[in-house]
Amino acid sequence: MITTTLYRSSRGLFMVFLFALSACTSTQAPAPDSGAAPLTERSASDWLRLAETAAPEQQLEYRLKAARLFEQQGQYTAGADILRGIPKQQLQGPAIGEYLQLSAGAIERQNGSQAALDWLTAQDQQSLLHRGTPQQQATIHGVMADLEDRTGNHLTAANRRMALAGILTGKQARSDNQDAIWRSLLQVPSPALQQSLDREPDTVAQGWYELALLGQTLEGDIEQQRNRLDRWQHRRPTHPAALLPPGEMGLLRQLADARPAQIAVFLPLQGQLKNAGRAIRDGLLSAHFDAGQSEVKLPVLRFYDTEANPDMAALYRKAVNQGAELIIGPLTKNRVAALLKNADGRVPVIALNYGPEDLASGENVYQFGLSSIDDARAAAELAMRLDYRRAFVIHGTDNQSARSAAAFQQAWQTLEGETVAAVEFDSERSTSERIKQGLHVDLSQQRARRLESITATSLEYNPRRRQDIDFVYLPVGSQQARSIKPLLAFHFAQDLPVYATSRVNRGKPDPRRDADLNGIYFTDTPWALGAMPQQRQRIEQYIERGGAPAKNLYALGIDAYQLAPRIPQLLYSPGLVFQGTTGVLSLSGEGVILRRPSWAQFRGGRATLMEIETTAEVETDERMDAIETKKQHGEQQQRYHYDDG
């Protein structure tokens, strides 16, 4: 029997299927991602020939075997052709699950994960799945959960897998499923998890949300995190994750006992970069002092001034010889590059910047910083998630703006997006003309003038911008953005969403001055945007107040300190994320700590923190409002003789 329970999330309604087997039946269901049974040595062509002369009930089975073989051999077109010709209403027994799994894979390869998920959740496929066995249903719902993860719907995927847990009786199947639940939940932003926890009536789901919140946090010392885990298990001794904990939880206990006793910190504490170095130092110390509020043994911090000790090879040896078990720093790119060449792997290093692209991280070296590439990647990923495909990039001639624009265009191209126009401005006077040209408003005006010349008539007309742009990427500072946002409206692009970087946020509220920024979406660190209020209240007593740049450097120091003992967790579990003060943090296979910043929007002249799901909903609403506004505007312009199209 299948019981359907309906849940509501910030993204709307979604279905989670709960399976209940007959009271007299015990079923061993496979893990959701298990493949089909091994095929014989026959070729795909053999199976197709057999299907031509087989009995009707065997024809479909043989054709599906051929499709599976074609898929395994990489002949995807041949496999897809077979699947399209199968009358699914005639499928019975094991053929149901095989057909659904193969077809979803073919659709995903051709049209993407969302298209495959949409197909599987359509009524026809769900009706077909309803006729399948519990094992088939478990497999296909596992496939659906994987697709939900790949489309960013991690909470939905986790809830689906929680439902699957009811019919998985094998220990390995249950363990794999629980690890998958854990990995999905760790991808969900903490505010969304907390919101789900607050409204969730089911105690098992409550326990999972609580555990994920514990697992995501970088707050405090790792021993404090272990103690919070112990308290959770004491409160929920019969929870599935307490009885069969995810692997990372066991590792956390070991790391608490093996955290470094002494940390060396390489920073510029004098010279041109002294303010940046001191801000990071203050962030490190504040996290250290905050962890010391509990009765845990803290590491010794030893600071080394890189301006006084510029030789990174010698400084590395000196720190190790003086007992350092982990190194944080250096800060500048050239010194990171020097350290990458000389670190011998004896102790872990968390560099606070990135070396040259052609210089890979050495053994036990991890690169972490506040890079414009992180902002660019976040903007590209969100735009693609919102089904945008065509970007208009506007940037200045300064290095920071140009680098951000180039990083965005590279990330956007990787995601198969198109930059239909990119304009660079070097003065306030040139900005309007460049935007006008990028939007093709000048071409619209030229067409109107030609028509006036041909007809020898003075026409009233509406110039129009090009219609092949979905959004604007604007990596500029706040002063430039305040000029450009009104210019976009002046040139008939007021309905286009605008994405910017953290440079647009000065960090000091000024609603009157920043009113021209209203509507702009931008990325920044959670710390600069006022997230994590309790942690901020405790930590800010140790640091001086400053604008957004200083706050982001404080946050970099805080995260570096709190990441230090947790690097083995990231190595153990690829895809594991932590909710840090600089963003959502994970580790790439190249030893780079990736950072996904938070999103905010200017509203009423103030930066307002947003969740990505909320951003998507707001953009949808605003696009509908813009369509309605354009419709009304068009009705008012009926009296004009010419409307350029």
Image (cartoon, rainbow, N blue to C red):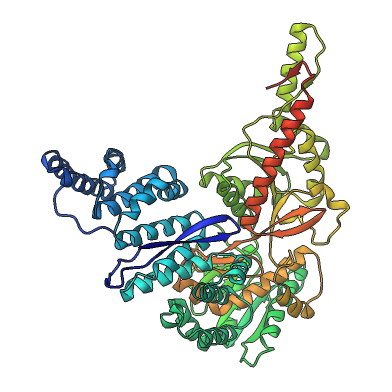
Left or right of 502? Residue 363 is left
Up-down relation of residue 435 to residue 346 (above or below): above
Left or right of 581? Residue 145 is left
Left or right of 626? Residue 75 is left
Of 396 and 295, the residue lying toward us: 295
Q: Position of residue 204 (x, y in %)?
A: 49, 75
Up-down relation of residue 91 to residue 574 (above or below): above
The quarter of the rendered structure image containing the C terminus is top right
Of 245 and 316, the residue lying toward us: 245
Left or right of 188? Residue 393 is right
Q: Position of residue 266 (x, y in %)?
A: 65, 75
Q: Furthest residue to the right?
A: 512
The residue shown at (62%, 32%) is: 468
Q: Furthest residue to the left?
A: 53
Q: Position of residue 136 (x, y in %)?
A: 31, 59
Quarter holding residue 388: top right
The residue shown at (54%, 77%) is: 566
Of 283 and 6, the residue lying toward us: 6
Do we see residue 150 in this rendering?
Answer: yes
The residue shown at (42%, 58%) is: 146
Q: Please state the total of marks drawn on the protein image.
A: 0
The quarter of the rendered structure image containing the N terminus is bottom left
Q: Position of residue 145 (x, y in %)?
A: 43, 59
Do we see residue 359 in this rendering?
Answer: no
Quarter holding residue 276: bottom right
